[in-house]
Image (cartoon, grey):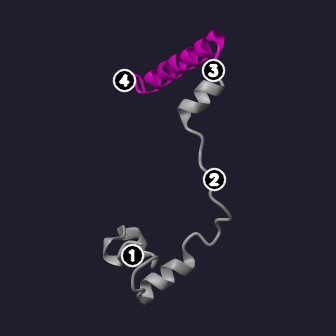
Amino acid sequence: MKAASKLPAAFLFFGWGGNNTAKENAMKQTYDVNVKEFKPLTSPALIKEELPITEEVAQTIIDGRKNVRTFYGAMTSDSL
């Protein structure tokens, strides 16, 4: 294991490898106390690969974005 002085700052701050101060111990005791587990997220690229969209879905997205731009463009016009 690396020497404490060569560990990343987060390790030292949270008391994982360095000399613990009272502040570090308090932080360690309250850090992520409500977190049950960590699960890695699937990357957007992998999701796109596994769930490709159809041409119809792509057109729906394009039309929806166009409608939003039109709506917000009307809201920001000088007529308001």
Placement of 15 over or under 55, stated as above or below: below
List the residue tagged with mark 2.
Answer: 39
Residue 45 in percent (x, y) is at: 53, 30
Residue wearing tag 1: 12
Between marks 1 and 4, how big is the CA–CA gap? 55 Å
- Residue type, numbered disc 3: Pro
Q: Which residues are magenta?
A: 53-80
Marks 2/1 in contact by CB < 8 Å: the verdict is no
Q: Quadrant of the C terminus?
A: top left
Pointer 4 or 2: first along the chain: 2
Check disc 2 and give the amino acid type.
Answer: Lys
Q: Secondary structure at mark 4?
A: loop
- Considering depth in this image, is 56 or 47 the residue closer to the camera? 47
Numbered disc 2: secondary structure: loop
User: Going by the image, does 58 lie left or right of 2?
Assistant: right
Question: What residue does disc 4 label?
Answer: 78
Give the foreground label among 1 and 4: 1
Asked if marks 4 and 3 touch (Cβ < 8 Å), the reply is no
Up-down: is 46 above or below 66?
A: below
Q: Which residue is mark 3?
A: 52
Give the mark nearer the N terminus: 2 vs 1: 1
Q: Which is nearer the N-term, disc 4 or disc 3?
A: 3
Counting residues from the start of the chain, the first of labels 2 and 3 encountered is 2
Residue sitting at x 52%, y 21%: 65
Whole-number angstrom distance, CA of label 4 to CA of label 3:
41 Å
